[in-house]
Amino acid sequence: MRIAIYPNVTKSGAGEILERVIKFANQYNIELLLPPKEGKFFYHEELINQNIEKEYIDMAISIGGDGTLLGLCRRLAKNGIPVCGINIGHLGFLADIEPGEIEAKLTKIINRQYKIEERLMLSAYIKRQGKINYIGSAVNDVVVSKCGVSRMLHFGVAINDYMVTNYKADGLIISTPTGSTAYSLSAGGPIVNPKVKGIILTPICPHSCFIRPMVIDESEKVALNIINIISMTKRSVNLTLDGQEGVDIEPDDEIIIEKANFPAQIVRFEDKNFYQTFMNKLCL
């Protein structure tokens, strides 16, 4: 079995967890691969593979929090590689392995006692001066929001080329069901089971009592146009993917969001389900 390991070099305790994984792998004849940066940082040059994302691997494991796992999903989803997370972060909603479970869960992995959940991803594009540019994909959400001291946005929202509404707000969260328990939830969006085939549109601080989140079919295309913003400059509005990657939006840009051509493949274990994890992690 070949497993790629992606430890977060900024997380305290990642090195200790990595050593436990390496020890387990040596006992069970698992081939481990490390990216160059991480291999050098943790002094395991013998495990470095320069072309790790082009190699055949059975699974990739992140060591960090949900953010580490999200970043890994965006990198590997196109290749159809299942991703699993060891949680040493704050929440660990997606990273399914806690530090006290590492050896037990790795044993389940080598015995194929796990399932792979395919999670909807979103792809974001910007139409600028007649040309459509691919920006990237997201597991949780694509967010269009104001920057810094810029004023409230006034934008129009079209679904499948039909103008649905226009309103004033600080921004809009376009979320997958997986991301419904992230930023969208904080902004008043609904909790949606990841198995639901839908996309959630959640406005950020709308200046109206009647603007509410919407859930649309996953096959539908969302388009946003900034109608007006006082003193809009190139850095007044930005678009972010999972809160980790972003680009500036220019005046007259059209933002297009739709279902990605590939899902994220996340490793899950039978002893945990969505509702149990939600209750435990979000302390309801």
Image (spheres, grey):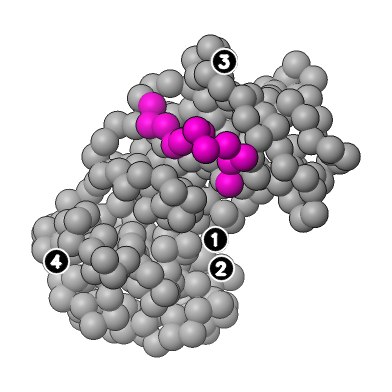
Residue type at the position of mark 1: Gln
Q: Nearer the viewer, mark 1 or mark 4?
A: 4
276 sits left or right of 139 in the view: left
Residue type at the position of mark 2: Pro
Q: Nearer the viewer, mark 4 or mark 3?
A: 3
Q: Which residue is mark 3?
A: 163
What residue sits 28% from the left and 70% below the top?
A: 283
> Residue 50 bears which disc, if any?
1
* Main secondary structure found in the magenta portion: loop
Q: Quadrant of residue 234?
A: top right
What residue sits 26% from the left and 55% below the top?
A: 267
Q: Which residue is mark 2?
A: 36
* Range of magenta residues: 205-216
Above or below, 98 relative to 109: below
Cβ–Cβ under 8 Å for marks 1 and 4: no
Q: Position of residue 172 (x, y in %)?
A: 57, 39
Cβ–Cβ under 8 Å for marks 3 and 2: no
Q: CA distance from mark 1 to mark 3?
A: 47 Å
Q: Earlier in the sequence, mark 4 or mark 2?
A: 2
Q: Residues within 10 Å of mark 1 (few under 14, many from 20)?
A: few
Q: Which residue is mark 4?
A: 108
Q: CA distance from mark 4 to mark 2?
A: 28 Å
Placement of the N terminus among the 4 image quadrants: bottom left
Q: Quadrant of residue 70?
A: bottom left
